[in-house]
Image (spheres, rainbow, N blue to C red):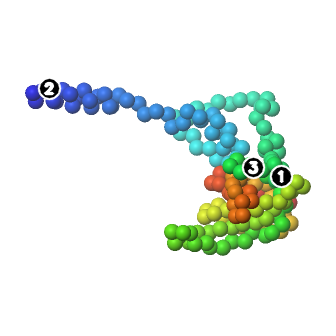
Amino acid sequence: MQIANYRIDLVLFFFFLMIRRPPRSTLFPYTTLFRSVFGNAVTINHDSFVRKIDDDGSIPSLSDLRTKISEIKSENNYCVEAIILKEPEKREVQTKTGETILLSEMFVEDASGQIWIKGWRNQAILLDGLSSGEIISVTAVNAKAGLEGRTELFLTPYSTVVKKN
């Protein structure tokens, strides 16, 4: 009886030892493209697959991905280029749970419309140093319904804000 239990334990030990963990992401090529367009860093480790490709024009440039403000719909990610109408305002906000967090927001426009861009917590810092009249390019912002049901843009961990002038 004792030998049988030992044998089962040994078999189970080797069984679990032989199981290989699954790859971290089966969508690696797609997440790489998304991050290369919407971010400035890609993490590559021993499980990663990298392949050099020729630029055949099939990968869109950032200017191809830009969206006019009037075409922005909730629950999507966008890249926009706009002029700052209202200088970013930073303040601390208290949540329902009592936590105090940082909020920075600014009002921007392009030729087609106007919209609020907001950064919460760490993303609020991305709006530091910007002022009215500057033209900016903002990548990887998420559109959501904000106050009074109007659509607003929210900075994400992959967002970048670049001054154009």
- For the C terminus, the quadrant is bottom right
Q: List the residue tagged with mark 1.
A: 70
Does 18 sit left or right of 70 as displayed?
Answer: left
Q: Position of residue 143 (x, y in %)?
A: 71, 53
- Name the amino acid type tagged 3: Lys
- Please name the residue that numbered disc 2 is placed on: 4
Q: Tell me the residue that label 3 is attached to.
A: 73
Which of the pair 159/67 is nearer the observer? 67
Horizontal and vertical percent for residue 111? 90, 55
**From the image, which quarter does the N terminus lie in?**
top left
Nearer the observer: mark 2 or 3; the answer is 3
Disc 2 to disc 3, how far (Cα)? Answer: 64 Å
Could one spot residue 119 in this view of the protein?
A: yes
In depth, the one of 123 and 117 nearer the eye is: 117
Q: Residue at x 83, y 57 (%)?
A: 82
- The amino acid marked with disc number 1 is Ser
Q: Is residue 44 above or below residue 55?
A: below
Q: Nearer the viewer, mark 2 or mark 1?
A: 1
Task: Measure the alpha-carbon separation of dots 2 and 1.
Answer: 72 Å
Tag 1 or tag 2, which sits nearer the N-term? 2
